[in-house]
Amino acid sequence: MSHPNPRNILVIGGGDGGVLREVVKHDCVEKADLCDIDEAVPRLSKKYLPHMAQGLENRKVTVVIGDGLEFVKKEASKNHYDLIITDSSDPEGPARKLFEKEYFEDCYNALREGGVITTQGESFWENLNFIAGVKRACKEVFPIVEWAWSSTPTYPSGTIGYFVATKDPLRDVRRPVRSFSREEERKYFKYYNQDIHSASFVLPTEAREVIEAA
Amino acid sequence: MSHPNPRNILVIGGGDGGVLREVVKHDCVEKADLCDIDEAVPRLSKKYLPHMAQGLENRKVTVVIGDGLEFVKKEASKNHYDLIITDSSDPEGPARKLFEKEYFEDCYNALREGGVITTQGESFWENLNFIAGVKRACKEVFPIVEWAWSSTPTYPSGTIGYFVATKDPLRDVRRPVRSFSREEERKYFKYYNQDIHSASFVLPTEAREVIEAA
């Protein structure tokens, strides 16, 4: 199966605009929709975090204020997103359902053949059993589910994780699809690069034992 | 050059005993010396952090209360340590000199042929130019100097780095020397394993650009 560069992206949550900023700078991206439940997030981000909020005002972007669960369900079975990024808060209150099987099913159906989701994946220091449970739920829907992490000082414990799942049963998401020259990496990224893509899926022993078994 | 398992270890700082605990559990280690400048650290660690302080009371261990700089200088030119681990506080006040060329020279001379040092290496989020400066100083002494990092929630920014240097000009310290089975990894380590050894040397783009150039 071929893996064309992503063209149509959906961001659930992420109302601060930071994820959008990172998405739209890639020329291959034609359209990025964002659905955040709280209108105050983009409003205050524009006022106080303009370096992040700039993503909200890009010409490729459509911002919807509403329930991400309903948005994805409405889009489900349309099969048109290449990538759905869930940039949610922790799994308490309204965000809880973004970590459950029904949401993953709706994402699956909103993705084109071979499409990918990545969702907020908590911290291996604090939420190991929760991570394992979400991975199991996601594996009931997607044939490939992996878990990566990054150093993220602003989150509790200094890391945040990411579930990465794809409809393509033959794909190894631990390897990057796109290739970047050193010059392109310097241009596009402060953190990400091809080597750290793969390294981010390498887990500390105790986390590995729990997450790989899930 | 062969790389026998380390037998004689020196820890500078680390008076809480945590590093020693991790060192002495390996059967290959015959002797571990520790020199910490502050007697209160082992004393209070024994009282309040017994799970770490247990390393101080192992039969392989000799604890010296004194200035690590002087201790290493005294041991310099003896060429008998396989590994010197510097587990210091930040480079302010007395710890400052543990990040300077003269200390690295003394470590070099206290190490056997092919020996290795690893020293506290600060955070790539907060101290990038400092890291580059220390790397340059270390490279004036050791032929091979690399920098790795781990997720460490108790440090500011949630990560801590490690300089790893060796007298052996042909050695790639980014690859582990010892090999462990999955079962051994589960037995010995909560964090470390062979894959994360190498992954820990993979740097985020902005950090890579600065540290690799140093």
Image (tube, coloured by chain):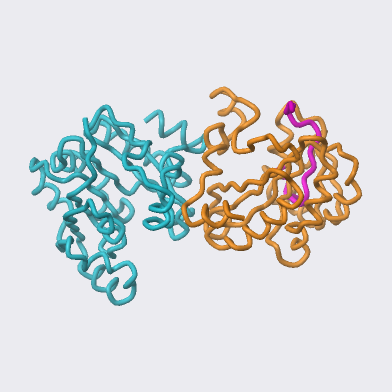
Chain colours: A orange, B cyan
Residue at (27% x, 54% y) in the render: B26
Is residue A18 visible in the rendered image? The answer is no
Residue A37 x %, y %: 82, 57
Instruction: Give the magenta range.
Output: A1-19
Residue B56 drawn at (x, y percent)? 23, 66
Q: A120 above or below A178?
A: below
Number of marks in the rendered image: 0
Query: Quick one: A65 or A87, which is closer to the camera?
Result: A87
Left or right: A7, with B60 as reference point: right
Magenta segment: does it hold A18?
Answer: yes
Whether B95 is among the magenta residues is: no
Rendered position, A56 above or below A67: above
Q: Is residue A74 left or right of residue B102?
A: right
Which residue is depicted at the point 42% across and 56% down?
B186
Question: Is residue A142 in view from this perspective?
Answer: yes
Quadrant of the rendering where the N terminus of chain A is positioned: top right
The picture places residue A143, in percent across and down from the top left corner, at 72, 44
Q: Residue furthest bottom?
A: B47
Left or right? Give the position of B78 relative to B133.
left
- The one nearer the camera, B88 or B186, is B186
Left/right placement of residue A103 relative to residue B99 reads right
- From the viewer's side, name the closer residue of A195 and B211: A195
Q: Residue at x 57, y 60 (%)?
A: A128
Q: Which of the two residues, A16 or A140, is positioned nearer the viewer here? A: A140
Which quarter of the rendered picture does the C terminus of chain A lie within? bottom right
Q: Position of residue B131 (x, y in %)?
A: 37, 40
Q: Is B161 situated above or below A24? A: below
Q: For residue B109, what is the image quadrant?
A: top left
